[in-house]
Image (cartoon, helix red, strand yellow):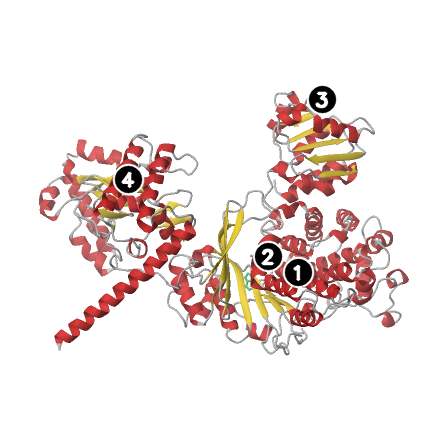
Amino acid sequence: MNAVEIEEAISALAELAFDADEFPFAFLQAFGNKETTLRRLRKGESNKSDLGGVLQTSNIHIAVAPLGQVTKTLAKLKASPATIRAKAKFVLTTDGETFEAEDIVGGETVACAYADFPDHFGFFLPLAGITTVKQLRESSFDIRATSRLNRLYVELLKDNPAWGTAARRRDINHFIARLIFCFFAEDTDIFNGTGLFTATVEQMSARDSSNTHEVIGTLFRAMNTKIEDRAAAHIPRWADVFPYVNGGLFSGSPDVPQFSRIARSYFLHIGGLDWKKINPDIFGSMIQAVAEDEERGALGMHYTSVPNILKVLNPLFLDDLRARLNEAADNARTLLNLRKRISRIRVFDPACGSGNFLVIAYKEMRAVEAEINLRRGEPHRRSEIPLTNFRGIELRDFPAEIARLALIIAEYQCDVLYRGQKEALAQFLPLDAENWITCGNALRLDWLSICPPTGTGVKHHADDLFHTPLDQSQIDFENEGGETYICGNPPYRGSQWQSDDQKSDLGAIFEARTKNWKSLDYVAGWFIKAADYGTCTNSAAAFVSTNSICQGRQVETLWSLILKTGHEIAFAHTSFKWANLASHNAGVTVVIVGISNHIGRTRSLFTLSNNAISVKQVDNINPYLVPAANVIVQARATTLSDLPEMIFGSMPNDGGFLLLDAEQARECVRLHAVDPVFVRPILGTQEFINGIERRCLWVRQSDYEEAKRNAWLKSRFESVAKKRRESNRATTSKLGDVPFRFGEVRQTGDEVVMVVAKTSSEQREYLPVCLFPPGSIVTEAFALLDTPLWNMALIASRIHLVWIATVCGKLKTDFRYSNTLGWNTFPVPQLTDKNKDDLTRCAEEILLARDAHFPATIADLYDAEEMPADLRQVHDRNDEVVERIYIGRRFRNDTERLERLFDLYARMSAEQAAATKHKAGRTHVIGH
Ligand SMILES: C[S@@+](CC[C@H](N)C(=O)[O-])C[C@H]1O[C@@H](n2cnc3c(N)ncnc32)[C@H](O)[C@@H]1O
């Protein structure tokens, strides 16, 4: 169950009459416990309570208290030996009137009226295994509000099918945005009197809901009419108490959808929530899913959490503002200059969704400004940070609309926090009609016209948010001479997953610059546009991105273009797993990369390990996010180091007629008298990792005549020939002349083969490499032929895996191997005979350790969870030997491994280039 589903379940439980016997089980059920688990608890089989309650091991001890004895019962639960023995995380008790609970580990407590316990559901989320985002526990309100609005949205669409059509989607989205504003306004004194909006709708609309839409419509009309125009507009007295809001929010279509009784009751329920608690960054991200049919089931599960947003914004510019604030101490002039600087900073998120990056940036900047004002003795001073300096582009209209609302709410909340309720109210209404969020395609829009460098008028007319289309005002930025920070979490979309439109968005940007653009992720478009923008403005940019743009072949395509604009990497977070609201986080691995063309002396490289972030100041961060020179590793035809050639296996190109499964292979010998010398084991990546037996027909030119005498073989050859000749590729068709052999033959078939997997699960700690006797044929995998065993020790090492992962990149989540890009470029120090002997011994030990587990396959042996200890030990020993060759000790971490590898790579490539040049020079002289 996800957080929203849990909230709904416990809200439903709190609405039922309290049933003392049933409560503990119903509570556990609401947190996703299955019927079988509950049955075992009811029977007492798994119930460890010593107080007549329900105790679920490692989770919670619940006991219903006698009336008025809740606090006492909680103390008993805490002190109970069974609670301690069963390692319960929570104790909980209620008498149906009061509710108390304690988080035993963290020490936090909840005490409230029974009816209000759903307000604290975030507190109990660890019961459902949701622990990843601490912030979630503080977002109970946002989740509840989202889930309620979701229900209302679905109900309204049911009652008003026309509003669900593409033509009217905007109207319903706009309507929901207005409602959110009204709910917030009625709970924060923006409207006179608490709950005025909901109460007015409740009083003025019939219980059968028939005129609800008219009542709401009248209120909206009032909020769109200036006070002095109200009489002429015939605004009824009951609506006249509402202030003039407009700001574009209440202009446009006055339509309100029809409400059923259920929808009306949902509406009243939502109005009953305490909207003061809204957290605009989180709420916005969650609520946007309401408008997406396919996302509604996972409301807001994919939003960027505040800690992750700060990973972008802090190093981009907030850390610097805070450092300047520290330096300024109480110096009034320096503080004033800093305030001026802050008021001219623009933050621009060109894939802003519901504006969470902008809201967080705004709030953090307000905090710095408030501190300045405090130190200057002007605590209630009006903020000089204009909301219009927080700009966004968003493709979908609802999030774009919510983004603007979220910023308005954030501004109001900051005013209340730093200046007081009275001042905040005095300046809040009417809303500003200016629009800072552009609804459109960021890769097609001109960022310079949305954020012009001179700080003057905006040239771009976007589709409407709060205005009718193409009627958006042109507004001035108040940032003359200021800095612009571009940030966000744009859509990543790997090349195979892009829609035609997205492909052509990229094409429009990259086609004229590079021929390899088709393999770029969609997010690459944002990086290059930010770099282009930076060439004309005082700006820096940082985005969250999939790590694939900093690995493998995309590095050359994208980063050589970015570096060409004069931008370099100012800071980066190396790969980390994405955490969001979902209880089972999607396995996406991301990086954060900040680019700038005016970087100070050092750059910050952040790395997450063992749940702690460490930061290192380094001289450079290269496009692989390694603290080394800006080298881009390019595929090579020969090895850079003194290593043997690695081939890619032979390709049958046979229509399947030269390949056999194990049974077919036995049959062809037994039933069709095929000579077994023509039947060879064949190994592809899947076969050798999973121990699958496959065979192929392998006939040499000299044996062809003899082989053809066998009728079964002859018919197979004929089938191969036919298939090949059918091809419209001339080279394939020509292969019809040699149907006895593979299309591309890369080995004799008599070699000892050292096979290396073409792809391997990222879960494995080492790359799969195996040795097979002469006679084995390799296909769909890489291989070294008749090479010394010490090569295997290198391929099986951690340092090789790290190199491959970085320079070859991934295929989905698998490591992708390449001989030209990975093996041929792999930098290895000159090996001595002793080194080779040591490595040979390590490889032998690995082979022996594997043998000891016969018949376990590579997949079994290298399962991350179940790798046998003895095998792990010999690999560890191998790593020790390999790494000593590199630096005389073990590396501390992968960053250090990569640092060394890139240094060596740069040095060896430069030496080779110099040697080639020298040789060319000499040839030239001799030739003279
Ligand atoms: C990963 S979300 C990030 C949004 C928000 N910052 C968050 O964390 O929830 C990416 C956003 O980019 C928007 N988007 C996708 N393609 C776009 C495009 N070509 N131009 C502008 N926005 C786009 C999506 O609608 C989505 O809201």
Amino acid carrying label 1: it is: Glu
Label 1 to label 3: alpha-carbon separation = 50 Å
Amino acid carrying label 4: it is: Cys
Amino acid carrying label 3: it is: Gly
Label 1 to label 2: alpha-carbon separation = 10 Å
Contact (Cβ within 8 Å) of mark 1 with mark 2:
yes
Who is closer to the viewer here, 50 or 470? 50
Quadrant, the N terminus: top right
Dot 2: what SS? helix
- The x and y percentages for residue 370 are 72, 63
Contact (Cβ within 8 Å) of mark 1 with mark 4:
no
Comparing labels 2 and 4, the label whose residue is closer to the camera: 4
Q: Judge the density around disc 3: few (<14), some (14-19), many (≥20) Cα neighbours within 10 Å.
A: few
Q: Quadrant of ligand 1?
A: bottom right
Comparing labels 4 and 3, the label whose residue is closer to the camera: 4
Label 4 to label 3: alpha-carbon separation = 60 Å
Q: Residue at point 21% right, 57% down?
A: 733
Q: Residue at point 60% right, 78% down?
A: 454
Label 3 to label 2: alpha-carbon separation = 47 Å
Q: Residue 52, which numbered label?
A: 3
Q: Residue 842, which numbered label?
A: 4
Q: Residue at point 60% right, 42% down?
A: 131
Q: Residue 364, which numbered label?
A: 1
Label 1 to label 4: alpha-carbon separation = 54 Å
